[in-house]
Image (tube, rainbow, N blue to C red):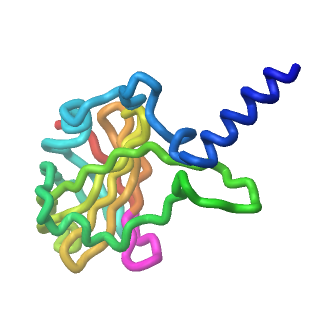
Amino acid sequence: MGKRWLLLGVFGLALVVNPYLACSESSSGESDFVYSEADMKLVALGNWQGTAEIDGVSTPFSLSLEQAGNNAKARSLGPPKVQPQCGSRSFVKPAAACVSMTTMPVVGTLSSENPALNGPVDGELSAFRTLDQVQLELRLDDGPLLGGQLHDQALSDGKIQDGSSDIGTFSLSRP
């Protein structure tokens, strides 16, 4: 019984000294993500066909996406999102200590007959440990924000927002 408490005490002390121990990758040093950068590119980048519904009018459009460079405007969607950090302290039990997430900045072109859905876009792809659902956020220059989840090479129930209000919906699929 005494060895058990001693072992628990040593582990507790190690956790206090290095709080990242609980949030680190697997003990072998390998990532627990099940995809690579190339896999993420295959899922989301390239050409898409879509339909948008704005004010009761259905508009077909095409979207071409590519990975943005480090200096790209893709980070203009707003300040970084607040995420729990591994070394934080709280007297209220948090929902999760760490979030393992991959983000990829993207740029592209949206083409349609509707001027509100025509022009260059920039944004971000986000995915957790698998590529089952990839969050897509795009902003047209001085225009609306398009957001939704890519799942099985398609996006349905996407939202088009202008400011904080929804102005329409959209869907995407591969041509």
Examine the rendered structure and indicate whether residue 160 appears above or below residue 21: below
What secondary structure is the magenta-colored segment mainly?
strand
Q: Is residue 81 above or below residue 124?
A: below
Left/right of residue 131 with respect to residue 46 in the rendered view: right
Pick out the residue farthest to the right.
1
Can residue 56 be seen in the rendering of this structure? no
Residue 147: where, in percent of width, then height? 37, 58
Nearer-the-camera pick, 148 or 52 = 148
Examine the structure image and report whether residue 167 is included in the region drawn in magenta: yes
Report the front residue among 170 and 64.
Answer: 64
- 34 to the left or right of 113: right
Specify start and end residues of the magenta stretch as a single range.
160-168
113 lies left or right of 29: left
Above or below: residue 175 compared with residue 76: above
Residue 74 in sight from this viewpoint: yes
Q: Nearer the viewer, residue 24 or 16?
A: 16
Position in image of residue 5 (x %, y %): 81, 28
- Tell me which residue sits at (21%, 64%) in the image: 74
Q: Position of residue 12 (x, y in %)?
A: 69, 39
Instruction: Give the image quarter of residue 124.
Output: bottom left
Q: Position of residue 66 (x, y in %)?
A: 13, 49
For the C terminus, the image quarter is top left
Examine the image and state in which quarter residue 72 appears: bottom left
Total count of labels: 0
Does 159 appear in magenta? no
Q: Quadrant location of the N terminus? A: top right
Q: Residue at x 37, y 76 (%)?
A: 162
Q: Residue at x 31, y 70 (%)?
A: 77
Does 148 sit above or below residue 8?
A: below
Which residue is painted at 38% across and 36% down in the image?
Answer: 151
